């Protein structure tokens, strides 16, 4: 379903569709974007843990210690400055089923306790993990942007209908 929602013809003939259908299309896009947002946050959390390990190695000193890493997780995973980008908040916090293909891809990168093993990875392995996570995060971000474009188009069509009187607030209450 995600692929069809991202196809070029998904928004074709939008003006001819019913207001209810346009609302449903928008809501479906919002639901998928919410799932993508969740996956992106999961990737970013893993990247934050990997980054913390890079810093620990640069500073030197303490030997790798899983208990210390675990105790530092709240600080590592706390909201921190992110690179510039489309920083939209999800429009809904309802749990959704994320894209199964992307879930499998993320699981292939960090599954089987990979993140717990960052302390024992060689530098090359850690760089490879960081690069794989960053690439995944970028692909998810690109897909989110595509959904934002669709959500904006669908919302603009609904707004146009209310502005021109084709749809009224009364129809929302019925």
Image (cartoon, grey):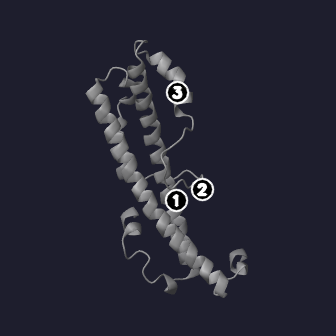
Give coordinates of residue 79: x percent, y percent. 57, 38
Give coordinates of residue 161: x percent, y percent. 61, 83
Q: What residue is shown at x 36% (from left), y 64% (from top)?
A: 3
CB under 8 Å between discs 2 and 1: yes
**Callout in the foreground (1, 3):** 3
Quadrant where the N terminus lies? Answer: bottom left
Q: What residue is shown at x 53% (from left), y 23% (from top)?
A: 72
The residue that label 3 is drawn on is: 73
Q: Where residue 31 is drawn, which disc sits there?
A: 1
In this orientation, does residue 66 appear? yes
In this orientation, does residue 100 appear? no
The residue that label 2 is drawn on is: 92
Which mark sits nearer the N-terminus, 1 or 3?
Answer: 1
Q: What residue is shown at x 47% (from left), y 21% (from top)?
A: 69
Looking at the image, residue 143 lies above or below residue 154: above
Q: Nearer the viewer, residue 92 or 156?
A: 156
Which mark sits nearer the N-terminus, 2 or 3?
Answer: 3
The local secondary structure at tag 1 comes to: helix
Real-space CA distance between mark 2 and mark 3, rounded to the nearest whole angstrom: 26 Å
């Amino acid at each position: 379903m995600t692929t069809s929602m991202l196809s070029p013809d998904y928004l074709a003939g939008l003006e001819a569709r019913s207001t209810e259908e346009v609302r449903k299309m928008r809501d479906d896009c919002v639901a998928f974007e919410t799932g993508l947002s969740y996956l992106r946050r999961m990737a970013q959390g893993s990247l934050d843990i990997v980054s913390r390990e890079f810093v620990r190695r640069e500073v030197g000193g303490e030997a790798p210690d899983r208990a210390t890493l675990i105790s530092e997780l709240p600080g590592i995973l706390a909201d921190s400055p992110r690179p510039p980008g489309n920083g939209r908040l999800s429009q809904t916090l309802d749990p959704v089923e994320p894209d199964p293909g992307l879930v499998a891809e993320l699981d292939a990168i960090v599954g089987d306790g990979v993140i717990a093993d960052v302390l024992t990875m060689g530098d090359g392995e850690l760089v490879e993990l960081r690069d794989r996570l960053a690439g995944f995060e970028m692909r998810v971000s690109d897909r989110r942007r595509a959904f934002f474009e669709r959500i904006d188009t669908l919302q603009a069509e609904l707004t146009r209908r209310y502005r021109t009187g084709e749809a009224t607030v009364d129809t929302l209450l019925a």
